[in-house]
Image: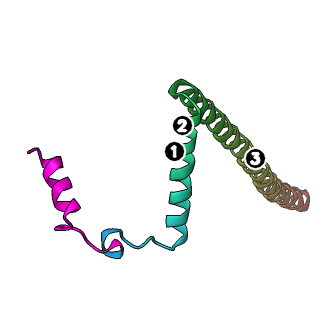
Amino acid sequence: MPNSQVDAHLISQQVLSLPRAAALPAPKRDIWAIIHRAAMRWHEVAAKRRPFRTHRRWMAATLLIVGLMGSGLSVSTWRVVSDLEDHDANREFKVRASNQASVLQRGIDEYLFTHQSVI
């Protein structure tokens, strides 16, 4: 007798039967388990409704759309940060240049004052 026939024979005679509660684990009630069960049910229904090639096309289209959206978001974020850094660098340059200009003007004024006093 193959194993499957032995198992069927033992179960039919209730030699190996367990109470239903002991045979099946209690379903989990947390949110991740609920989401996982719903996703598995959706996947089973989708697999029955569409042939494999159509599913593969949908998967490729989804990955392409998500990839393009991710790339667009990355480029737009880079552009915003680049503009902010350029603005900040320009402001810092103007502050330093005005400080250098005021130091230079003060030096010229002192030189002219001492040069006029000598004359």
Name, please, the residue furthest toward the left. 1
SS under mark 1:
helix
Q: Residue at x 30, y 75 (%)?
A: 19
The amino acid type found where label 2 is placed reads Lys
Q: Which callout, 3 or 1, points at the residue further toward the start of the chain?
A: 1
Point out the stretch of residues depicted in magenta. Answer: 1-20
Rounded to the nearest angstrom, the CA distance separating label 2 from label 1 is: 6 Å
Residue to which mark 2 is pinned: 48
> Which marked residue is nearer to the observer: mark 3 or mark 1?
1
Q: Amino acid at mark 3?
A: Val
Residue at image position (91%, 58%) is 116
Q: Quadrant of the C terminus?
A: bottom right
101 to the left or right of 45: right
Q: Nearer the viewer, residue 44 or 99?
A: 44
Q: Which residue is mark 3?
A: 80
Q: In percent of the image, x 16 and y 60: which residue is there?
A: 10
User: What residue is shown at x 46% (from left), y 72% (from top)?
Assistant: 28
Name the residue that disc number 1 marks.
Answer: 44
Q: Earlier in the sequence, mark 2 or mark 3?
A: 2
Where in the figure is residue 72, as x and y percent of width and height? 70, 38
For the residues labelled 2 and 3, the Cα–Cα distance comes to 46 Å
